[in-house]
Amino acid sequence: MADRTVVDRRELERALRAEVRGEVDFSPGARALTTMDASNYRRVPDGVVAPYDAADVAAALAVCRGHGVPVVPRGAGTSIAGQATGTGVVLDFTRHMRSVVSVDPAARTAVVQPGAVLDRLQEEAGRHGLTFGPDPSTHSRCTLGGMIGNNSCGSHSVAWGTTADNVRELSVVTYGGAELRLGKGWGRPGSGPGTAGAPEGLRELVAGHLALLRTGFPGGLPRRISGYALDALLPENGTDLARAFCGSEGTLAVLTEATVRLVDSPPARALAVLGYADESAAAEAAAGLLSHRPLTVEGMADDLVPDAVGAGLPRGGAWLFVETGGATAAEARARAEEVVRGADALDGTVVTDPAGQRMLWRVREDASGAATRMPDGGGTPPGHGSTPTQAGGSGGEAWPGWEDCAVPPARLGAYLRDFRALLAEHGLRGTPYGHFGDGCIHVRIDFDLLGEAGVRRFRAFSEDVAGLVVAHGGSLSGEHGDGQARAELLPRMYGDELVALFGGFKDLWDPAGGLNPGMLVRPARLDENLRFAVLPREPVDVAFGYPHDGGDFTAAVRRCVGVAKCRVDGPSAGPGVMCPSYRATGEEQHSTRGRARLLHEMLAGEVVTGGWRSREVHEALDLCLSCKGCRSDCPVGVDMATYKAEFLHHHYAGRTRPAAHYTMGRLPRWLRAAAPFAGLLNAASRVGPLASLAKRLGGIAPERDIPRLATRTFTSWWRRHGTHGSPLVLWPDTFTDHLSPSVGRAAVRVLESAGLGVSLPPGRVCCGLTYVSTGQLDLARAVMRRTLDVMEPVLDRGAPVVVLEPSCAAALRTDLPELLADDPRARRLAGSVRTFAAALEEHAPDWRPPRLDRPVAGQTHCHQHAVLGDAAERRLRERAGLTGELSGGCCGLAGNFGFERGHYEVSVACAEDRLLPAVRAATADTVLLADGFSCRTQLEQLAGRRGRHLAEVLAEGLPVEPTEPAYGA
C-alpha cells in the first residue's frame, strides 16, 4: 500500500470522524506516541483511532478499506518484535474497549474486550478463587488482545500453558468486513453476523496439506510461538480456529471480544529459591523439577543480579525460582521443601512471606528493563553511555532482537552454552534469563544499532543464532512472537513450503493485505525500520551532565525501551510513585514512556517538528509533576524530571516565561524579600479581591489558598538559640525557613536530645530546586555555585549536612552534581547530604527516641522514595513505636506544580489516588506524617488535616523543657 500524502490523511481523518464514535486523532502528537512499541523498530502511522465498541471497529475497517489504508491493532504497546508498529491507522483498544465483561465461576470462563488489562481480569477472577493462567511480566499493563495476538505465556505456563491453551472463543472482524466467531470446528457459515467460523476456503487449504501440517512443526516444544499455528486445524487437534488465531499478531482479523478459560488459583503459594554454580547447571536442572508439578520454574544468572545477597538470594552464581501451590500455607511450603530436597542445588531456601516473594518476583519481572543496561558499559559505541546508572543497571546499552527463543527444556543447558559461545564469537554480550522450565530464554544483547557496521553485525548474529536454535530443535519465538524481528528467518525453522502455506493462510483471511502488513508473512527485513536511524548522530547541546549516559541527551532519551511500567494504575501500581499524571489521566502522553517517545520524535524531527520549541512535547511535559518517581521505579532509570527541566530551559530561551516561573520558580528570592512584611502579607492574603489579584498575576490556580508566611523565620530564631562550629550542619531550606520554621526548631531539639551539636551554614544557601523544576537552569547554576562558595569551609571539614525537606535533599544529591559536573565541590556536597533519620542513625546510633506507640498514616515523599530511600525513616519510626505503612504515590502538589493555574484538577486526582484515601481511613489517634512541605500543604488544603514532619512528632514526645517553650510551636 502506497504512502499517503497530507491531503490523503486529511480525507481519511474526515471520513473516520464521520463514521466512528470513538476518538480519531491524526495530530503529530498522537502519531508520535505510536511510532514504537518495546522493540527496536519504528514506523510512522497516519493516525490513531480509539474505537468505542465492535461496531466502531467494523466502521473504522470499512473506511480504511475504502481508502486502501492498512490497520494495526494495538494494546499496551509492549510487543518486543515490532508487531505493534505500522503505517496506516492504529486501533488503540486501551481507551474504551477495556472491560472485563463477565466472569462465570461455574463454567470457569470470562468474557473480555481486547483492551482489558490482565491484572483487571485477575482481580475479577480472584474474587472467585480463579485466575487466568498466562501471566507475562508486564501483567500490570498488558492487554488480553495483545496477549492473544502474540500468544503470550508468562512464568506460570509450566502449569497452565500459553494464551492459546486458555482461549475458548473469539469474536473478530476481518479487513474485508466479515464478522466471525471462532471456536472449535469450522463454524456455521451464513447463519448470521458473528456466527460464521472459518473464512471461505480455509477448510480446503487444510485438507489439501494434511501431510505437511502433520510433519512440518517441531515437537517437544511447550513454547512454539513462531509462525501460524496451522496444526491446530488438524482434525486430531480438534480443528480449533480460536487456537489457530492466537499468535497471528493482528495479521488475520481484529479481535473485538474473547471468551477465555480460568483455572483454580491455589489459595497459598510458596517459593523455593535454588542456587546453582552457574547458568548451565541451573538450566540442566530445570527440566528435572517438572515432575514436582510446580507452578513456575524461572531462571537467571548473576550477571543480571550482581547483588545476590542484597536481593535475598541463596549462595550460587545462578538461581531457579520454583513456585508451588497448595490449599494451605503448610501444604504449599511442604511442596516447596520437597523441591529443595529433590534438587541437586548448591543452596536453597523456601520463602513463604508474601512480601518476601513479591520482592524476589520484582527482581525477575524488572529484568526486561534492567537487562537493557550492561554491567560496565562494554560493547557500546564511544559516547553512548559507559558509567553506572541509578536504576536499570549500568550505562552500556542492550536491546531486544533475539529476545525469547525456546528449545526443548532438556536441551536448554546445551543451548545456553552454545549461545554464549556464539555471543563471544560475534563480540557481543547479553544476560539470559527466563522460563527455564519451558526452555524459553529472554536476553537483551549489546548490539550497536546506531552505525552501519553494528547493524550488519546485528543481522549476521540473528542469522547465525536462528540456525543454532533450529539445530537444537527450537522455536525462533517462545513468547513474544515473530513480528519484524524474526519473521524473515521463519524459512530456517519451517522450510519454504510451510512458510508459503502461511502466506496462503493469511491471504484467505486478508486478501487485500490490509492488516499489519510486513509481519509474519512477506515480512520486512529484520534490519529495516530501526528506531535509532532517525536520531541525530552528534551530541545535542544540553545543560545537565547526564553522567549515566556519557553526557549524551539522545542516549538518555534512548533509555526508554517501552516496557511501560509507567502505564500501571490501580492496585497493580504497588508502593511506587511512577507515574502520577498517567494514573490521573490515563493518557499515554502523560506517562513516562509517552513523554520519552515524544522527546525521541522531537530529536528525529520527522513527526514532531520545532525541536526544543515543540508544542507537543511541551503539552506532554506540562503535566509532569517532576516527582522523580521514574528515576527509581522505571526499570531502565528514565529520569523525566531532568528531561523536563532540560526541555523548559531550551523551550523558553530568549522568550517570556509563564508567570508561575517568575513567581514560584524564583520563590526563594521572593520569600527573602517578603520576610520583613510577613504579617502584613498574611493579612492581605485573607482579603478575597487582593488574594484573587495576586493569584491571577502570579499564575496561581484560583482554587488554591496562598500559604501563610512565618512571622519569625527559622534562621532568625536560630540566631538567638544556636551555636556555631558544631559537627552537624542543618540545612535551612527555603520551605523550613520561611514557611515551616517549627520543623527546623523541632529538628534542633531532637538532634540535641540525641547529643548532637548543630550549626547552620556560614551564609545564605539554596539548593536551586525551584529554579530547576521550572527549567531556569542558568539561574539554578548561579544559585548553586554561590551556595558551594558558602559551603566550602563545611565541606573542607567533612561535616555531614542534614536536610529536612526531602525535595531539597534530592536536589542536592542529584541536580547539583549533574548541573555542575565541572565543579568537584558539587559531588562533595551531594555526598555529605543526610536525611534527618539517617543523621540520627549514623551519628547517634545508641540514642533512644521517645516511645509514642501510635499508628501513622500519610505518604513517603516522592523524592525521598526516588532518590534518598526511606529505610532509615522506617527504622526510626519502628523504634519510636510509630506503626503502620505510609502510602506510595505522589501527593499531587509537587512544589509549584499543584499551585500553577491549569493543574488543580490533576493535582487533586493525584492526591485522591492514594494519599487522601489513606488519610480518610485513618483512626482519630493516627499520626499524619508528611516530611515534605508540599505534602503537608496538600493535606491541609484538600483534607483539612495537619500533617507533621517526623521531627515534629518526635519532639512532641520529648520531656518538656520550660526554658525552650517554642521548639515545636
Image (cartoon, rainbow, N blue to C red):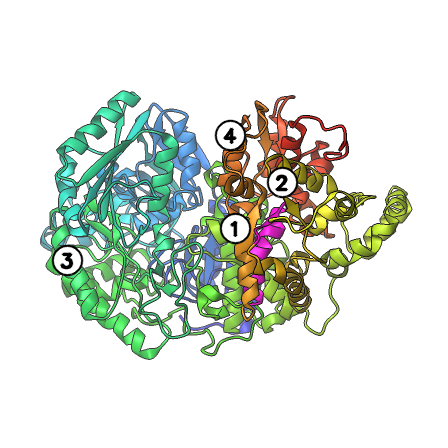
Circles 2 and 3: CB atoms closer than 8 Å: no
Looking at the image, tell me whether mark 3 or mark 1 is earlier in sequence order: 3
Looking at the image, tell me whether mark 2 or mark 4 is earlier in sequence order: 4
Of 695 and 520, the residue lying toward us: 695
Looking at the image, tell me whether mark 3 or mark 4 is earlier in sequence order: 3
Q: Which residue is mark 3?
A: 417
Circles 4 and 1: CB atoms closer than 8 Å: no
Looking at the image, tell me whether mark 1 or mark 2 is earlier in sequence order: 1
Question: Where 185 falls versus 389 (above or below)?
Answer: above
Q: Is residue 566 left or right of residue 240?
A: right
Residue 388 x, y percent position in the rendering: 41, 61
Q: Which residue is mark 1?
A: 867
Three-letter code for the amino acid on which mark 3 is drawn: Arg
Q: Which residue is mark 4?
A: 878
Q: Which residue is mark 2?
A: 931
Of 897 and 947, the residue lying toward us: 947
Labels 3, 4: front one:
4
For the question of whether residue 550 can be seen, the reply is yes
Q: CA distance from mark 3 to mark 4?
A: 48 Å
